[in-house]
Image (tube, rainbow, N blue to C red):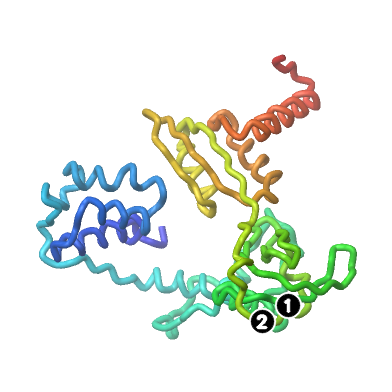
Amino acid sequence: MLFLEVYGTYYHTVASILAHAVDGTLTDRLLTRLVQEQAFGESVLTIPSALKSGEWPLLDRDLGTPLRHAPSMPLTLLEKRWLKALLLDPRIALFQPDLSGLEDVEPLYLPRDIVFFDRYADGDPYDSPLYQKIFRTALQALREKRMLQIRFVTPAGAARDATCSPRRLEYSEKDDKFRLLAVGSKNTACTINLGRIRSCRLLDPVPEDALSPELPRSELTFLLYDQRKALERVLLHFSHLEKKTVRLGENRYQVTLFYDSADRAEMLIRILSFGPMIQVISPPDFVESIRDRLRRQSALSGMPRDS
């Protein structure tokens, strides 16, 4: 492990809780809020109960702590080398991260040392100065809530001009491309591959009446049976999505995912990859899509199917 377990998200969250306990400001509500803000969605099921029950003997009944000083966890040299390597990634470099404190640190590896075998080879041109300028202009528009004037090329090769209100940037790991999700002049949602944009110009702030509607999102709920570390694998696999996780019983959970409606086909494939560990319960049309996919797979394999 490059990062020791004691330097992970859970330990940073507990360290933050203990810092408040040391200065006497910790309350039940603050404890829960710190876990929700700093840990993972499902952490509210474990961290507060472990601390308050004494399973982790770090807090007393009054939410005080025997510690006299707040925890401090400086980075190790190995962790600094790993961070330096990570920040050299051309995709991360688009965000112009601060490298302060890492100037004299040798990276653990270089981007050329990584070979990808599970994604398309025609990713975005991250090293292109024009692409970098367009990306950062779009990012500035998102942060400052400003309109954009863009010129882009359609898949058919035609040039188009558009004025839009950007909503967010998304990265497709499979395609190795960034996409700009925006609302156009006719108040309709649109998605444009950033690599197809040829020019990008900042305009005035987005009008108040143009802040809606929200981009279309879909909701998917399934039951999860935690066998062969299924819970850990599912939460890691969908870590980039907003989710709600509820424990229903021993080794049984209900998970709700929120995703972009345009990614429905990809979500179907990803859900099916977990096999019987997941049982989708809503929405009904997604359940029917799973049944239809399984029927077609069964027919192709020559296996008998249930009626």
Query: Which of 42/183 is in front?
Result: 183
7 left or right of 69?
A: right
**Which quadrant does the C terminus fall into?**
top right
**Which quadrant does the N terminus fall into?**
bottom left
**Cβ–Cβ under 8 Å for marks 1 and 2:** yes
26 left or right of 34?
A: left
Q: Is residue 236 above or below residue 109?
A: above
From the top left corner, tell me how far across and down residue 106 is, in percent: 46, 79
Q: Residue 69 sits in which quadrant? A: bottom left
Q: Is residue 130 above or below residue 234?
A: below
Residue 168 shows in this picture: no
161 left or right of 72?
A: right
- Residue type highlighted by circle 2: Leu
From the top left corner, tell me how far across and down residue 108 is, in percent: 48, 71
The residue that disc 1 covers is: 149
Q: How many marks do you count on the picture?
A: 2
Residue 4 shows in this picture: yes
Residue reaching furthest to the front? 209
Q: In percent of the image, x 70 and y 51: which residue is there?
A: 262
The residue that disc 2 covers is: 202
